Amino acid sequence: MPQFEIRKLINREMRRISFKGSLSEAQIRDSSLEVLKGYLRDIIESIVGSTEKCPHTMRVAFKKLHGRVEERFPDMENQDAKYIAISGFLFLRFFAPSILTPKLFNLQDQHADTQTSRTLLLLAKAVQSIGNLGLQLGRGKEQWMEPLHPFILSSIGQVKDFLDRLIDVDTENEASENQSWTPFHPSATIKEGYLQKRKAEGLHLISRFTFKKRYFWLSNKTLSYSRSPEWQVHTSIPVRRICAVERVDENAFQQSHMMQVTTRDNGGQLSTMYILCKNVNELNQWLSAVRKATISNECMLPFCHPGAFRGNRWTCCLQTDRTVRGCSRTHSAVTLGDWSDPLDPDTEAQMVYRQLLLGRDKLREKCLEFTSKETTLEQDRGTQKDPNSRQMAAAARLLEVIQDLEQAHKAFEHREEDERASASPAPQL
């Protein structure tokens, strides 16, 4: 949904003409209902007309989801499931929240006042009901929304047509396009704001005055900064040249909440820019944003220095060679998610094994249930198999894997006990 549509909606509500004179309560209610329908009509028209603005990656994912749900629920009574699988996500995670709290999506500078917030709440609930294809209507919940039910039901057809167009996308040549995946639209500003920056050159004497306040913009293409948001001259760093985005040790500059951005130029030379944030929340937000923007970069470094080169040595590892390989693994080399600790394969394997053991009894019950159903179907329909036979085979195979793991685990425990026994000193006689 375009940003200007939501802004227009909020501004119209803020300029809403108050009722004057001696209007009855019923007249006020009917008039408010028509105003609300007008807002909803604008919202739905904007949504159903935004097909081409949806990122290609999301459309491909929705198409695959649509196909899998249609394959899993082929019955006529479940025909809407393939639509709800997509619309429930889109409307719940994108459209309804942006209407309810526009400030969080940078659609408004301030939170709406109480009266406008009430209207936005009604609109968000109505839009969510439309996204759910009206399945919850008339079931005794939120009866105060009943006057909007006719409009909601009349909009379901438009939403289905919109979803059909949304998944009408070619996926055959997707791999050959050789486009880097990114979670952001190329023209979108992912994050912006004032930060303190300092380049890595000349770091022998560091004071708080060596960090310069600059306004930063991050997009899918560049990390740019200038003296102020209105300043015409920008310094831009191509995102594709960023090869490390990491925290900086506090003792490197005697400053908290710092990050470093390491880039590689066309000649292969590395350079580092240190960035000071106001607090830990701002630091985490910028780390997350830059890491997501560089998620498809192939030049990411596996090691870096979490400190700085000062006094002819690194503050982190005390090495005197400035070009020596980093002493700490980078985020891209050791983690699955933002701000995670380095992975311990043994610990992770143990956690997976423990979860499998906890679910073994329930899995066994499910496997027996599938077997019983298949036996009944074979008796009733001859050789026809239960459509759940594939799930049954997968459950049986997983049970075999759990049994093999349990045997291997017990053998390992026995071996460790034998090694401890043989290593312990013999008792004194």
Image: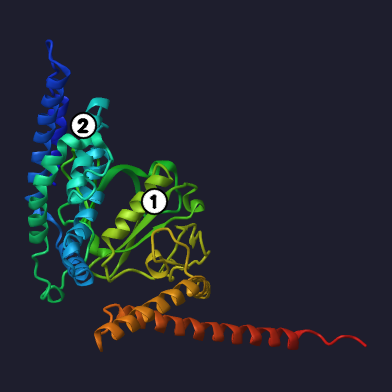
Q: Is residue 135 above or below residue 21?
A: below
- The residue type indicated by label 2 comes to Thr
Up/down of 238 relative to 283, above or below: below
Q: Upstream in the sequence, badge 2 or badge 1?
A: 2
Residue in view at x 64 percent, y 87 percent: 415
Residue 247: give its label: none
Residue 98 occupies quadrant:
top left
Q: Which residue in the structure is indicated by mark 1? A: 284
Residue ID at (21%, 31%): 119
Viewer can see residue 276? no
Nearest the camera: 146 or 215? Answer: 146
Q: On the image, which quarter does residue 9 sit in?
A: top left
Along the viewing direction, whichever of 353 and 377 lies nearer the viewer:
377
The crowd level at tag 1 (other Cα within 10 Å; few <14, some 14-19, many 20+) is some
Residue picked out by circle 2: 119
Separation (CA) of disc 2 from disc 1: 34 Å
What kind of colouring is applied to the model shown? rainbow
| Badge count | 2
Which of the pair 65/299 is nearer the observer? 65
Can the viewer see residue 69 in this picture? yes
Q: Residue furthest right?
A: 429
Q: In x, y percent, where is residue 178?
A: 15, 73
300 to 109, vertically: above or below: below
